Amino acid sequence: MFKALTIAGSDTSGGAGLQADLKTFQEYSVYGMTAVTVMVAQNPKNNWSHDIYPIGLDAIEAQIDTVLGGIGVNAMKTGMLPSEQVIRLVARKLREYGCSNIVIDPVMVCKGTDEVVNPVAADAIKSELLPLATVTTPNIYEAVQLSGIKPIDSIEKVKEAAKIIHALGAKNVLIKGGTKLGTENAVDVFYDGSEFLLLETPVINTTYTHGAGCTTAAAITANLAKGLSPKDAVLNAKEFVTAAIQDGFRLNEYVGAVNHSAFRERAD
């Protein structure tokens, strides 16, 4: 059985965070395990505002030791790491256990809130986590924070940002441009240090995208756990998340989530 770990926040509504990761791992027949870094609850009495409840450093470390020290994994990913202290702890544990096949999803904002990871924490992601990354998966906002390029509003600027992020230590970079670049299609850019690959899909006219970023990173993680190359892992993950977005559904009056079983159901 292939095994994977997600070190990430818990999304109580189930669409993103470690819940999305576990659903994705299961779709790939990968046994998923977790280390919870923060809990996010959505308040139905206040327009679905996001309330964030941190987890203590000792508890996070104990969870990581349980999985990496007591079981072992074929691949792992990070998600929301809410502080510099948590980032440095996670990086130290990954080095301690000699982890490989690491996907760094540099989550810097909780969708639905204006709470952004502070600049010191963003710097810690750059210095501590990117050098460990087999693949990193920033969206446009996160790519701005990591590369220093502002604004990123064209394919050429995405490529420039990818080069900078690769130079910070990430072996492979996937920048999720989506529909934010003014292109006819939704475009993501993959860079392995030598060549660029543009991943283009028709624009999907939906707002039911909650969890798409986490799902992409988790699908890449699952593919790496099963032995795919980073490029092939990304290509397959793109197909997986595209199907999930196409079959997204309304969760409530505030949000819609991607459908994690869509790729399998279409194959069936």
Image (spheres, helix red, strand yellow):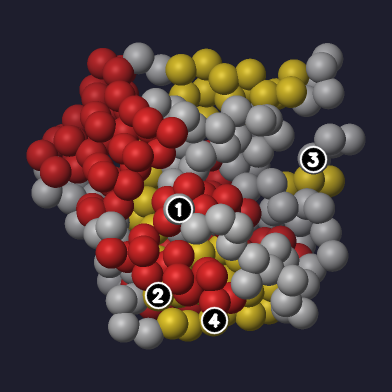
Q: Secondary structure under badge 4? A: strand
* Closer to viewer: mark 1 or mark 3: 1
Judge depth for marks 1 and 2 and give the one in front: 1
Please tell me in which quadrant of the rendered image residue 19 appears: top right
Spatial CA distance of label 3 from label 2 is 32 Å
| Residue kind at label 1, given as amino acid type | Gly
Locate residue 262, reporting x and y percent: 67, 64
The image quarter in which residue 246 lies? bottom right
Would you place residue 22 above or below residue 38 in this image?
below
Q: Nearer the viewer, mark 3 or mark 2?
A: 2
Answer with mark 3 or mark 2, whichever residue precedes in sequence: 2
Residue occupied by mark 1: 148
Q: Position of residue 113 (x, y in %)?
A: 68, 30
Q: Are marks 3 and 2 in contact (CB under 8 Å)?
A: no
Earlier in the chain: of badge 4 and badge 1, it is: 1
> What amino acid does circle 4 point to?
Leu
- Find numbered disc 2 in the image and state the secondary structure of the residue it sits on: strand
The quadrant the N terminus occupies is bottom left
In this orientation, does residue 132 appear? Answer: yes
Query: Which residue is painted at 65% across and 38% down in the image?
Result: 111
Percent x, y of residue 216: 53, 59
Q: Secondary structure at mark 3?
A: loop
Numbered tag placed on residue 255 in the rendering: 3
Q: Residue 191, labelled with which disc?
A: 2
- Quickly name the residue at label 4: 198
